Amino acid sequence: MTTSSSPATAQGSGELMRIEGLQAGYGPVTVLWGVDLVVREGQITALIGSNGAGKSTLMRTISGLIPTRAGRLLWQGREIQHSTPAQVLGMGIAHVPEGRRLFSAMTVEDNLIMGAYLRSGNRAQLARDLERVYEIFPKLAERRTQAAGTMSGGEQQMCAIGRGLMSAPRLLMIDELSLGLSPLLVEQLVEALISLNREGLSILVVEQDVVAALEVSSQAFVMDMGRVVQHGPSDQLLADPAVRRAYLGALAD
Ligand SMILES: Nc1ncnc2c1ncn2[C@@H]1O[C@H](COP(=O)(O)OP(=O)(O)O)[C@@H](O)[C@H]1O
Ligand SMILES: [Mg+2]
């Protein structure tokens, strides 16, 4: 049963974002068939599921890049399913897309500055925010004048996350955190995310490595064929025999 939830209620229950019956797709194709999901304030939430399940499509729909066909997207209790990408970013939802999508010919620093394009042109604040990103990812500081496209995949992922942080988000959505990256770099990225989360940033992460995703998150949602088919505390999912069979089969043997 749906009752209209006021922002106060949403805050009280620690809910940052609630998705109800969300449907979306591309042209004649429906991909999301009614997604239900909740992101709680201050948590790392994992989104897992096989290729083609609809994880990227869900993130694109949240970002306003794809129109919502049915259902609701509540941000701090407010309906935002018809917002534009710029409005969504302005509300505090940053999206680090699959494949990173940096401006490869531009410098690292200019890519980072692009992340702040919606914010007021206060140069001192911009400089402080840049320094903060360089503190989190010292590698980016070393390479600030280098063209982003010449860096390793891991460094590019740092730059994409840094660009997301430059919008001063409350929720950072990262699509495919570790895809194609070396284990050492993945470890550095995960550590950076954990420390950002400790400072209060909420994170929604799509991650192929299900064990890593469940270990780093508090809550997890499993998608299949455009729906959420299972969700719960990550430690419970990690221990769940059905989840282990479906997603960790190769590792369990
Ligand atoms: N731009 C697009 N146009 C048409 N279909 C797409 C597009 N992007 C993804 N799809 C389809 O949507 C489904 C879900 O894809 P996606 O959201 O990328 O899944 P995931 O991120 O979980 O791997 C797949 O069947 C895929 O082929
Ligand atoms: Mg994807």
Image (tube, rainbow, N blue to C red):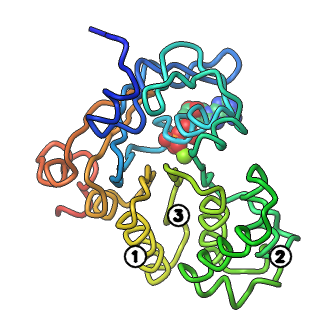
Q: Residue furthest bottom?
A: 142
Residue 107's disc number: 2
Q: Residue furthest right?
A: 105
Residue displayed at 26% across by 35% down: 13
Give the amino acid at mark 1.
Glu
Q: Earlier in the sequence, mark 3 or mark 2?
A: 2
Where does the image place residue 3, in percent across and percent down from the top left? 32, 10
> Is disc 1 surrounded by few (<14), some (14 to 19) or many (20+) residues within 10 Å?
some
Amino acid under disc 2:
Thr
Q: Secondary structure at mark 1?
A: helix
Label ID, residue 191 = 1
The label number, if any, that marks residue 179 in the structure image: 3
Give me the C-alpha separation between circle 1 and circle 2. Answer: 25 Å
What secondary structure is marked by label 2?
A: loop
* Circle 2 Cα neighbour tier, 10 Å, few/some/many (<14 / 14–19 / ≥20): some
Q: Is residue 110 left or right of residue 97?
A: right
Please identify the quarter of the rendering in which residue 139 is found.
bottom right
From the viewer's perspective, tell me whether residue 166 is left or right of residue 207. Answer: right
> Horizontal placement of 115 versus 181: left or right?
right
Q: Decide which of 150, 143 is in the foreground and name it.
A: 143
Q: Position of residue 138 (x, y in %)?
A: 59, 87
Dot in front, 3 or 1: 1
